[in-house]
Image (cartoon, helix red, strand yellow):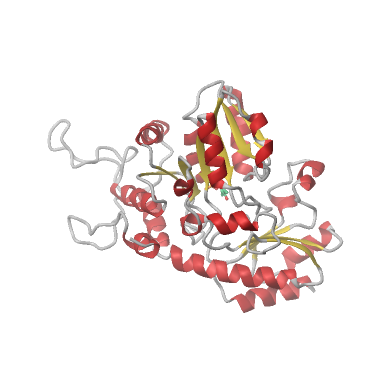
Amino acid sequence: MKFGTKAIHAGVEPDEATGAIMTPIYQTSTYVQEAVGKNKGYAYSRTQNPTRHALEKNLAALENGKHGACFGSGLAAIDCVIKMLNTGDEVVSTGDLYGGTFRLFKTIFEKYGIKFHFVDMTELSSISEFINDKTKLIWVETPTNPMMSIIDISAMATIAKQANAVLCVDNTFATPYLQNPLDLGADIVMHSVTKYLGGHSDVVMGALVVNDDDIAKEMYRIQNSSGAVTAPMDSFLALRGIKTLHLRMQRHCENGEKVARFLANHSKVENVYWPGFEDHPNHDIAKKQMRDFGGMISFSLVGNKLEDALDIVSNVKLFALAESLGGVESLIGHPVTMTHGAIPKEEREKTGVVDSLIRLSVGIEDAEDLIEDLKQALS
Ligand SMILES: *Cc1c(COP(=O)(O)O)cnc(C)c1O
């Protein structure tokens, strides 16, 4: 089955009781049993719920995986992956990481004796020095935030296999429409469903998809034991959002390219970071592992003045100044004052997060209107 057909049909059966074509919102905590130990497959909604179950099967199909699990947020999904580890284990992680993931690793799990190494994974040769016999997990995020660097997932899978470690890829920015990490050798793929999958800025949710039956067993054990599960209503909204994922992503990519090219030709713009440009440092890897280049763009300004960037983010009228990404509406953000403020200036400037850097989540409005808005804000 092709992607668009799966997005609409995978995991979704007409309701057995009524024939309803949309999976109902099974707003129930428990299920009446016919006899002790005899139920219709559902016993308690933390463990499983029919609406969530349909969504989990749908997500697994989109990532070409066997087992899906949904969580109360993207961070709760990441929390589940780290809980598969033991005290003394080590993790090698992408350095240019989503801030919330960094905070979870450093301020929650380090105190339980798990050690994290943050490395520049675009330099494959620099990774081996962080790998030893305690390395149990390699954590990859690609494209990275906000610099849109691309990490070679197949190469990381080879490194993980040699180290006997599990490879998990945060696929939030790319979505399964653009890249499928399990097909490239990853063991676990993670999503913040909050972003493109939900797509309408109305749900906070996370997900994991795996192929391996043993990893799946651990994943479901932790999902049920820690209990950070998704509500039936939110599962319904995510299922509904996913039905148009392929259409939305197509438009995000088209608009992303138009906006990126407009910015690249603007006299006040210094650098534009978008993996579709042939002179992007990781363009070849992006072409190899992604089907298209997405709608996430960062750019810096000539003169690199903080005030200029703040002027632009407050002068746009269509782009909304907000955290998050991946919704139908376009968003604009200033990493230095919004998401990356806690990182020391020298540290962040080393990775390119300079004072004038602006990040765009290009939505699915008409590109001409978006470009018009940026044009007036830049002048
Ligand atoms: C938003 C995001 C997360 C965290 O997801 P939440 O749903 O906000 O908990 C993790 N990784 C990436 C890349 C994200 O953009």
Q: Residue furthest left?
A: 35
Q: Position of residue 324 (x, y in %)?
A: 59, 55
Q: In the rendered view of the protein, which quadrant contains the N terminus?
A: bottom left
Q: Position of residue 53 (x, y in %)?
A: 32, 47
Q: In the rendered view of the protein, which quadrant contains the C terminus?
A: bottom right
Asked whether 30 or 51 is in front, the reply is 51
Query: What residue is drawn where x is 77% and y is 71%?
Result: 378
Asked whether 86 or 159 is in front, the reply is 159
Query: What residue is drawn where x is 39% and y is 64%?
Result: 4
Query: Relative to residue 48, is residue 359 depicted above or below?
Result: below
Q: Position of residue 255 (x, y in %)?
A: 59, 71
Q: Position of residue 369 (x, y in %)?
A: 63, 77
Q: Viewed as shown, does residue 158 lie left or right of 208?
A: right
* Quadrant in the rendering for residue 311: bottom right
Query: What residue is drawn where x is 56% and y is 73%?
Result: 365
Q: Viewed as shown, does residue 166 lie left or right of 22?
A: right
Q: Is residue 278 visible?
A: yes
Query: What residue is drawn where x is 45% and y is 65%?
Result: 246
* Quadrant in the rendering for residue 348: top right
Q: Is residue 324 visible?
A: no
Q: Viewed as shown, does residue 289 lie left or right of 260?
A: left
Q: Viewed as shown, does residue 93 lie left or right of 280?
A: left
**Count of marks, rendered view:** 0
Asked whether 337 or 368 is in front, the reply is 368
Q: Residue furthest right?
A: 303
Query: Relative to residue 139, is residue 58 depicted above or below?
Result: below
